[in-house]
Image (cartoon, rainbow, N blue to C red):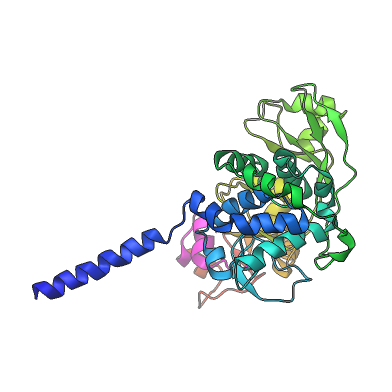
Amino acid sequence: MIKKILSILFITLSFFINAYAQKLTPEQYVEKYKDIAIREMKRMGVPAAVTLAQGLLETENGNSDLVKKSNNHFGIKCKSSWTAGGVTHDDDAIGECFRSYKDANESYRDHSNYLRGSDRYASLFTLQPTDYKAWAKGLRKAGYATNPRYPEILIRNIEQYNLQQYSLAAVGDMPVIETSKYEDDKEPVVKKTDKIEQQSASNGEVAETQAINKLQYIIGKKGVSLLAIATENDINLNKLLSYNDLSEDGILKNDQIIFLQKKAKKGDKDFYIVQQNETLHDVAQRNGIQLKYLLEYNQLTEKAIPAQGLKLYLSPTAETQLVKAIQNNAKEVLPVFSKTKTHAVLPKEGLYFIARKYQVSVKQLREWNNLNTDELKIGQQLIVSN
C-alpha cells in the first residue's frame, strides 16, 4: 500500500516538474530561435534583434496558447490571401483565424515574407538594419500592432536580452533584395489619410494625424489640456469636445484618441469585442463612431459599464431598426391616451421587467391589459398605469 502511494506521489511530482520545465524563459526562447532569426535576416533583411523581440512578446516567451497550437510566433492572422492551415484564437474579436505552421522555421520564414512582401512595411527596409529603435517605431507606425507601447516593449526586450548582437552577426551577409519577388501576401491595406506633422506647443514633440474609420485623429498626450489641442489644430474648443463626446475642457489623465473632425454614425466593421477595463466612450473613440449611436445600436444607456468580451454592434441591426420603429410608432400613439401611460414592448422584455420599470405589480399589468398569459409580443402596447 505504501509503495502504491509513493508511486502515485512520484508520478504526480514528475508531472508538475515536467510541466514547469516546459515553460520557457526569455533567455531559453532566444537561445532556441536565434539561429533562425539570423538566417532570416541574411535571407530577407529583417533585423534578427527585432524578429526575436517580436517573438518574445507575441508568444509570451514561447509559452502562449496560440504558439503551442499553431507554431505561430508573430500573431499573423489568416487574411484573405492565406490558403494554408489556420486555427481560431480570441484576439481583437472572438474566434479570429490565425495562420498555422508545421514548425517554427515556417513561422519565421513567413514573418520575413510578410514584412518584405507588403507595401505597408516597405518603408522599414529603407532603415538601417542595426537601427532597432527606428524599426520598432516603424512597425507600430505601419500598423503591425495596436498597442501604443509596442515599440517601447520591443526596445526593452532588445536591450534587456542583448538581442542586438544577433543583428550585428548577420548584417555583413545581407543580400540585395528584389522586393517584387515577394508579393505573396498582398492583403487589402486600409490606407491612412495624408499624414500631417505639426509642432506641439505643449511638449515640443511632433504630433502625427492618423485615421480611424476614415476620420482624422491624434493621440492626445497625458497632462495636455483639450484647449491646447484645440488651439494647436485650429479647432474651436466646443467643436473638439463635441467631436469626442466630451462635456468640458480638462487635462488628459492618460494618452487617448482625440478626433479632429465629427465622428461617423456607423463603424467600418459590424461589431467590436469589449476589451478589459474599456468604457463605452473608449469603444466609441477606438472605432470612430458617435457615442449616441453606439448606445442606440446596443440599447444601452451612457452609464452602462460593458463587460469584457461583450459584443457591441457598430451599425444598425434588424433588431435595433425594429426597436426604433416601435419607439417612433409609440410616440404617435401615446397622445391618444390623455391620462393613461403606455409602454411598447421591446425585444427580450417580460412582464416582470416592465413591472419593475414602472414600479407596479405584475398582477396590475395583467388586470389593466386583460392578459391571460405572460407571453408578450415585440411592439405590443401595454397600459402601465391605472
Does residue 376 sit above or below 385 in this rendering?
below
Observer-nearest residue: 324 or 88? Answer: 88
Residue drawn at x 73%, y 62% as measured from the top left? 324
Please report the bounds of the magenta region as a residue range.
Answer: 347-363
Observer-nearest residue: 16 or 290? Answer: 16
Q: Position of residue 233 (x, y in %)?
A: 85, 30
* Residue 59 appears in the rendering: yes
- Residue 118 included in the magenta stretch of the image: no
Q: Which corner quadrant of the image does residue 81 belong to?
A: bottom right
Residue 1 as seen in the image, left or right of residue 55: left
Q: Position of residue 39 (x, y in %)?
A: 68, 58
Residue drawn at x 84%, y 52% as measured from the top left? 122
Does residue 366 sit above or below 160 in this rendering?
below
Quarter of the image with the C terminus is bottom right
Residue drawn at x 81%, y 36% as measured from the top left? 208
Observer-nearest residue: 93 or 13? Answer: 13
